[in-house]
């Protein structure tokens, strides 16, 4: 029985390869993630690269049980068309590399095709329904309920509820969203807190999230449309199936394909922000996993009904979605699910 090079213990459970060496599943992921952590922004310096994360190697269309550093690019080009300095090495610090064409990522996500958004009024407000800041034409999603000192809060994103840092605390939030016909009579709560997004060059963010304090506890439901009530949160893992319930595309399915993602996100107004330690999901249906208006959706493991993270960005022309780990949000706001 082989010994894991990282922890020195015999490999008795789930395993992955790094090169030709066997690792414990979690040890292999951690080994690759340390490269992203140590190399940082230099990994985003290659031409066309918008992201890098820990994922499985894909050879001739087949997903291998080999951990690699997976680079997302705006568009794949042949090596002979690139300068030497722009060619991603086949291996970095002992970890093989792979390249996938994702396109650029935006928050809010890009529009969907033919869908029927949830524009109706929900009372009590349910997770997966349409919300917005009272002055914003950008619709988003009420993800679900979190609690702080037994008080309920609606969780969504900064760019939906806090207008990319421009809103004031206690600003009204409406359901449905203004773009969906919501008016001042539809106030369901007030902006309680949000994570600041730093758009300065070279600064790395971790969260795009906001808390909304409901008018009262009877105004909100702990149920999420088409999902029901969740049962806490859990960490993400490679390969697991996930679902989300959002304002625009409703209930959709996908799989986690990368962890520890370092990525550039484009925001309205030609702003961009870098985020680290994110989760990349690929949709497994014809429609996109998330689209414009789905920001703030809870992403869950349907097998356990536990929340994995909060959806906030998507790729322009591929079915990829970016998710912030719920653990990070819980730690930042001090809330529980």
Image (tube, grey):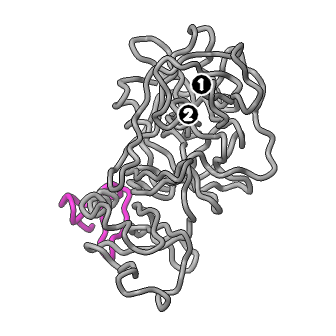
Image location of residue 133, percent across then percent down: 60, 27
* Residue 92, picture quadrant: bottom left
- Say which mark, if any, is on residue 305: 2
Span shown in magenta: 1-26
Q: Residue at x 43, y 51 (%)?
A: 273
Q: Nearer the viewer, residue 17 or 87?
A: 87
In percent of the image, x 54 and y 23: which residue is there?
Answer: 154
Tell me the SS state at disc 1.
strand
Q: Give the side of residue 233 with respect to residue 74, left or right.
A: left
Disc 1 to disc 2: CB gap under 8 Å: yes
Mark 2 Cα shell of 10 Å, populated few (<14), some (14-19), many (≥20) = some
Image quadrant holding the N terminus, namely bottom left
Q: Which residue is mark 1?
A: 229
Front residue of 137 and 231: 137
Can you say whether 67 is above or below 219 in the image?
below
Compared with residue 58, is residue 247 higher up or lower down, i.e. above or below? above
The structure residue drawn at horizontal position 50% and vertical position 88%, both measured from the top left corner, is 81
Residue 307 relative to residue 317: left or right:
left
């Amino acid at each position: 029985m082989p010994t894991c090079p990282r922890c020195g213990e015999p490999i008795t459970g789930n395993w992955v390869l790094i090169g030709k060496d066997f690792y414990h599943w979690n040890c292999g992921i951690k080994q690759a993630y340390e490269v992203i952590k140590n190399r940082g922004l230099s990994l985003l310096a290659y031409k066309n690269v918008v992201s890098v994360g820990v994922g499985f190697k894909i050879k001739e269309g087949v997903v291998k049980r080999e951990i690699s550093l997976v680079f997302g690019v705006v568009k794949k080009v042949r090596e002979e068309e690139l300068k030497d300095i722009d060619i991603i090495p086949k291996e970095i610090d002992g970890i093989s590399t792979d390249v996938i064409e994702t396109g650029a990522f935006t928050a809010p996500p890009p529009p969907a095709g033919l869908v029927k958004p949830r524009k109706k009024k929900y009372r009590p407000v349910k997770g997966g329904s349409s919300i917005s800041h009272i002055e914003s034409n950008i619709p988003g999603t009420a993800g679900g309920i979190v609690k702080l000192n037994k008080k309920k809060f609606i969780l969504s994103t900064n760019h939906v509820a806090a207008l990319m840092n421009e809103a004031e605390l206690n600003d009204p939030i409406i359901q449905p969203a203004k773009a969906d016909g919501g008016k001042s009579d539809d106030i369901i709560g007030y902006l309680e807190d949000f994570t600041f997004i730093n758009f300065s060059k070279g600064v790395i963010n971790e969260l795009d999230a906001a808390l909304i304090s409901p008018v009262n506890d009877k105004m909100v439901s702990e149920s999420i449309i088409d999902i029901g009530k969740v049962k806490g949160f859990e960490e993400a893992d490679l390969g697991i199936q996930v679902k989300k319930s959002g304002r625009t595309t409703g209930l959709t399915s996908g799989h986690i394909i990368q962890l520890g993602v370092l990525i550039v996100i484009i925001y309205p107004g030609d702003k961009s922000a870098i985020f680290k330690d994110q989760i990349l999901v690929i949709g497994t249906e014809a429609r996109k996993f998330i689209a414009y208006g789905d920001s703030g959706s809870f992403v869950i493991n349907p097998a356990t009904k536990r929340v994995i993270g909060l959806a906030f960005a998507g790729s322009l022309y591929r079915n990829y979605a970016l998710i912030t780990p719920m653990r990070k949000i819980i730690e930042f706001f001090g809330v529980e699910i």
